[in-house]
Amino acid sequence: MSIARYESSGILSSAVEHGDTVYLAGIVADDPSKDIKGQTEQILGKIDGLLAKCGSNKSKVMTATIWVTDIRNRPAMNEAWTAWVDPNNLPARACVEAKLADPRMLVEIMVVAGK
């Protein structure tokens, strides 16, 4: 079975497609000046684009792992998440507090989706 890699850099690929499964790396916002809701919206837009490159979409997301730098910001992140996620196809999800590599980033999201 073939493996396709998308948007590869020196240390990772943003998406890897293997068979009927799409694995996304942890995705962060492009504009760290935004609040957590704004960063989450940017991330979800990037996820949409990566899934589309792989022939998938948000209705096929099976799992999501979300890291927030302050768990008290979870409700604001959830506002963006709830507006984006397919309510008829909710993924399994974890949301945990963690330090991120860039202190300006408030949230990072990684998903696994089917095709």
Image: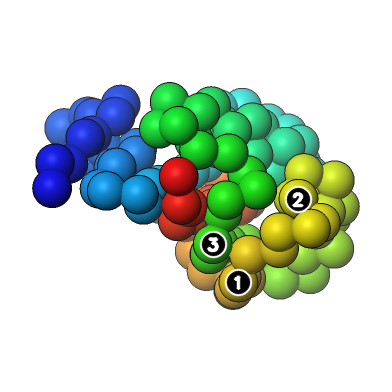
Colouring method of the image: rainbow
Question: Position of 30 compared to 16: left or right?
Answer: right
Q: Residue at x 61, y 70 (%)?
A: 93
Q: Position of residue 112 (x, y in %)?
A: 45, 56
**Mark 1: amino acid:** Ala
Q: Which residue is mark 1?
A: 92
Q: What is the CA distance from the residue labelled 1 to the residue labelled 2?
A: 12 Å
Quarter of the image with the C terminus is top left
| Marking on residue 10 | none
Crowding at mark 3 (Cα within 10 Å: few <14, some 14-19, many 20+): some
Distance, label 2 to label 3, CA atoms, is 11 Å
* On screen, residue 5 above or below 102: above
Are the two marked residues, 2 and 3, in contact with CB atoms closer than 8 angstroms? Answer: no
Q: Measured from the top left, where is residue 14 in percent x and y? A: 35, 37
Whether residue 40 appears in this view of the structure is: yes
**Could you classify mark 1 by the number of other residues whose Cα lies within 10 Å: few (under 14), some (14-19), or many (20 or more)?**
few
Whether residue 39 is visible here, answered yes or no, is no
Residue at screen point 63% across, 64% down: 91
Marks 1 and 2, the one that precedes in the sequence? 2
Q: Nearer the viewer, residue 20 or 62?
A: 20
Q: Earlier in the sequence, mark 2 or mark 3?
A: 3
As shown in the figure, which amino acid type bears the numbered disc 2?
Asp
Does the residue at mark 3 contact the one at mark 1 (Cβ under 8 Å)?
Answer: yes
Question: Left or right: 11 with respect to 21?
Answer: left
The residue that label 2 is drawn on is 86
Rendering quarter of residue 66: bottom right
Q: Which mark is residue 62?
A: 3
For the point 72% across and 37% down, the residue is 41
Which quarter of the figure has residue 54? top left
Q: Amino acid under label 3?
A: Met
Callout 3: helix, strand or loop? strand
Q: Dot 1 lies on which element?
A: strand
